Amino acid sequence: MLLGGNMGDRKALIARARLLIENRVGEIVRSSAIYESAPWGFTAKQSFYNQVLVVSTHLTPHQILGKILQIEKELGRERTGKNYSSRTMDIDILFYEQEIIDTPDLIIPHPQLHKRRFTLIPLNEILPDWNHPGLNQSIRSLLEQCADYSAVEPIKG
């Protein structure tokens, strides 16, 4: 999973999202550092904080989606259409083991993850050898080939 947001107390919102995920979705077994990056696909005054989590769960992908949409809402997320915008919390399912899912409401692996350094850098920190089932390449390889050169830096403290 990828957690991210650029509104409110970004660090506290990530901590709260982690707690809610552990309570409702499953055990967090690995997590990256928290990284700061500029908005991707739109302009905003505040930068994003992002963190990748590996979660062990017995839930199905659609059950997870339902839980994370509720968590986002509880953390103040307001969905205002299909365009990218500032938000308190966004939670994306990046992978579900090696499954490929393509339904109207859920696509796994996340269709944009290989294009975004703010996703690939924290993923590479904790899962560099993970094989993307749709692209059949490691996270390390996807990061090396990524055409996005935006700055993604670990936050301090």
Image (tube, rainbow, N blue to C red):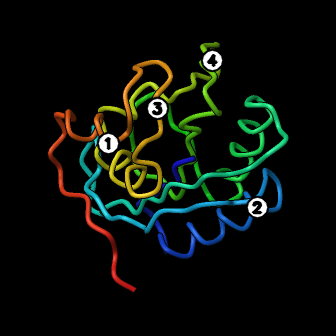
The residue drawn where x is 49% and y is 30% is: 110
Q: Which of marks 1 and 2 is in front?
A: 1
Q: Is residue 77 left or right of residue 5?
A: right
Q: Which mark is residue 36?
A: none
User: What's the CA distance linking mark 3 and mark 2?
Assistant: 25 Å
Of the pair 38 and 113, the residue shown nearer to us: 113
Relative to 72, does residue 60 appear above or below in the rendering?
above
Mark 2: few, some, or many residues within 10 Å (few <14, many ≥20)? some
Q: Quadrant of residue 106?
A: top right
Q: Measuring from the top left, give residue 19's x and y in whole percent.
A: 72, 68
Question: Where's residue 147, x and y in %?
Answer: 16, 34
Label 4 close to label 3 by CB (< 8 Å) = no
The residue that label 4 is drawn on is 101
Identity of the residue drawn at 19% across and 39% down: 148
Say whether residue 101 is left or right of residue 35. right
Residues at marks 4 and 1, CA–CA distance in whole angstroms: 23 Å
Q: Which of marks 1 and 2 is nearer the N terminus?
A: 2
* First reached walking from the N terminus: tag 4 or tag 1: 4
Residue 63 found in image quarter: top right
Instruction: Check disc 4 and give the amino acid type.
Output: Ile
Q: Mark 3 points at which residue?
A: 131
Q: In this orientation, which residue lies closer to the viewer: 36 or 121?
A: 121
